């Protein structure tokens, strides 16, 4: 399958992303676009359908990785890993030193990519105040981080 990677930048694409995240049982209502502060990407098929998604929210030298999802029928084909690798590469171009995430469903997936479990208490305060940390992700979610190589 031919897939094209695009940045999610307009209202229509955002609404499609929110619907996609809802289908994949991830937080979706608090997802917002904000140039310079948030980067959301999608892999799209030839018909323009969203097949995989992922995003970074930037908080100074820390970033929150969120909204990583792959359409159920396309899982197990490295699309999730490609999406995370792409977002790590984008973070590498920015003054970001560490990437954090919260996950209930896929800690092993992220660990394979290089993320390590970390105590929620060591997450920078600005990131702890983000909607995902503060409101939408349950306290039982595992917190993980990735240190960018500089
Ligand atoms: C988690 C998810 C994004 C993985 O996407 P995917 O495209 O199937 O994953 P990949 O094919 O890139 O897998 C990469 C590696 O992780 C492994 N892996 C994938 N999902 C895994 C999981 N849930 N638990 C453990 N390992 C997993 C794969 O076997 C593969 O290992 P390998 O490199 O040794 O072959 C996908 O299952 C998904 O959308 N889940 C629902 C949404 C979700 O939970 N998102 C994460 C929370 S933010």
Image: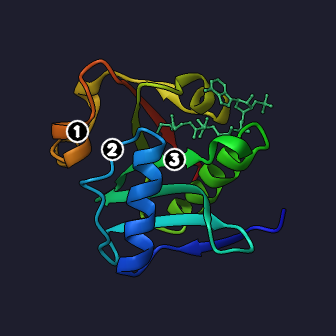
| Residue 8 image point, x, y percent | 47, 73
For the N terminus, the quadrant is: bottom right
Which corner quadrant of the image does residue 137 belong to? top left
**How many numbered circles does the render carry?**
3
Work out whether residue 98 can be spotted. no
In this view of the protein, which residue sits in the foreground, 16 or 35? 16
In the image, which disc is placed on residue 50? none
Depth check: 35 or 9 in front?
A: 9
The residue beneath circle 1 is 136
**Quadrant of the rendered image containing residue 143:** top left
Residue 26 falls left or right of residue 49: left
Q: Residues within 10 Å of mark 1 (few under 14, many from 20)?
A: some
Q: CA distance from mark 3 to mark 2?
A: 11 Å
Residue ID for mark 2: 27
Residue sitting farthest toward the bottom = 10
Do residues under tags 1 and 2 come within 8 Å of each other at their CB atoms? yes
Whether residue 34 sits left or right of residue 150 in the image: it is left
Between discs 1 and 2, the one toward the N terminus: 2
Comes first in the chain, label 3 or label 1: 3
Looking at the rendered image, the quarter that the C terminus falls into is bottom right
Q: Residues within 10 Å of mark 3 (few under 14, many from 20)?
A: many
Alpha-carbon neighbours of circle 2 within 10 Å: few (<14), some, or many (≥20)?
Answer: some
> Which residue is at a point 35% across and 78% down the rendered structure image?
11
Q: Does the beta carbon at disc 3 come under 8 Å from ligand 1?
A: yes
**Residue 36 position (above or below residue 17):** below
Real-space Cα separation, disc 3 to disc 1, in angstroms: 15 Å
**Closer to the camera in the image, 55 or 12:** 12
SS of the residue under disc 1 = helix
Q: Quadrant of residue 27?
A: top left
Image x and y of residue 146, in percent: 51, 39
């Amino acid at each position: 399958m031919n897939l094209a990677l695009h940045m999610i930048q307009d209202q229509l694409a955002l609404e499609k992303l929110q619907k996609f995240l809802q289908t994949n049982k991830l937080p979706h209502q608090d997802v917002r676009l904000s140039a310079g502060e948030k980067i959301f990407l999608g892999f799209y098929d030839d018909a323009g359908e969203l097949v995989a998604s992922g995003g970074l929210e930037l908080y100074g030298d820390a970033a929150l990785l969120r909204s990583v999802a792959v359409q159920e029928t396309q899982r197990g084909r490295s699309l999730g890993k490609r999406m995370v690798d792409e977002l790590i590469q984008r973070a590498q171009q920015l003054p970001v030193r560490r990437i954090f995430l919260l996950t209930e469903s896929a800690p092993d997936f992220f660990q394979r990519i290089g993320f390590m479990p970390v105590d929620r208490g060591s997450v920078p305060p600005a990131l702890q105040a983000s909607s995902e940390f503060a409101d939408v992700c349950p306290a039982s979610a595992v917190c993980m981080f990735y240190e960018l190589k500089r």
